[in-house]
């Protein structure tokens, strides 16, 4: 995926209603409306994003795979960042790379 794809997914999920639909709300039902299945939530997300601002046409299954992959990348980088001994290597320091830039290269929106 390209950075713009990540941007589109993150922007979509930043909406609290979309987040609940995709990530679930535990055993609680949504206030003021019924819950929908994750399959339906990814179908709605795929329809909303497909073809918008260059986002590729995708099916709900492809949308789910993209979202799950991005979530995994984010969690892996978060775990790495929080581990002992993480930092910049000499070559990165010499290039003037900051830790924030390194994290952003590894996972946009980190």
Image (cartoon, rainbow, N blue to C red):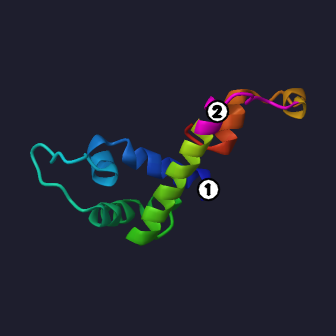
Nearer the observer, 55 or 65: 65
Residue 72 left/right relative to 61: right
Mark 2 vs mark 1, CA separation in Å: 22 Å
Q: Residue 77 versus residue 85: which sits nearer the camera? A: 85
Q: Nearer the viewer, mark 2 or mark 1?
A: 2
**Secondary structure that dominates the magenta span:** loop
Mark 2 and mark 1 in contact? Answer it, CB < 8 Å: no
Looking at the image, residue 35 lies above or below residue 16: below
Query: Considering the numbered disc 2 on the image, is that residue within a helix, a strand or a loop?
Result: helix
Give how far across and how far down residue 33 sits, in percent: 11, 50
Residue 2 is marked as 1
Q: Is residue 6 magenta?
A: no
Is 88 colored magenta in this rendering?
yes
- At label 2, counting other C-alpha atoms closer than 10 Å, the crowd grade (few under 14, some 14-19, many 20 or more) is some
Crowding near the residue tagged with mark 1, few <14, some 14–19, many ≥20 C-alpha atoms within 10 Å: few
Residue 4 seen in the figure: yes
Quarter of the image containing the C terminus?
A: top right
Residue 83: image quadrant is top right
Instruction: Tell me the residue at 61%/56% (across/down).
Output: 2
Return the residue found at the far front: 84
- Give the quadrant of residue 37: bottom left
- Residue at x 62% of width, y 41% of height: 77
| Image mark for residue 81 | 2
Q: In x, y percent, where is residue 105? A: 69, 42
- 58 left or right, relative to 32: right
- 46 on left or right of 99: left
Q: In this rendering, would 51 be left or right of 19?
A: right
Report the magenta residues as a range: 79-89
Q: Which residue lies furthest to the left in this view?
A: 32
């Amino acid at each position: 995926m390209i950075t713009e794809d990540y941007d589109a997914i993150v922007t979509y999920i930043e909406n609290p209603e979309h987040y609940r639909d995709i990530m679930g709300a535990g055993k609680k039902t949504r206030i003021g409306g019924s819950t929908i299945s994750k399959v339906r939530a990814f179908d709605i997300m795929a329809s909303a994003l497909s073809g918008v601002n260059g986002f590729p046409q995708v099916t709900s299954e492809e949308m789910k795979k993209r979202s799950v992959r991005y979530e995994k990348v984010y969690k892996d980088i978060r775990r790495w960042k929080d581990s002992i001994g993480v930092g910049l290597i000499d070559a990165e320091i010499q290039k003037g790379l900051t830790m924030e830039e390194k994290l952003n290269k590894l996972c946009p929106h980190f």
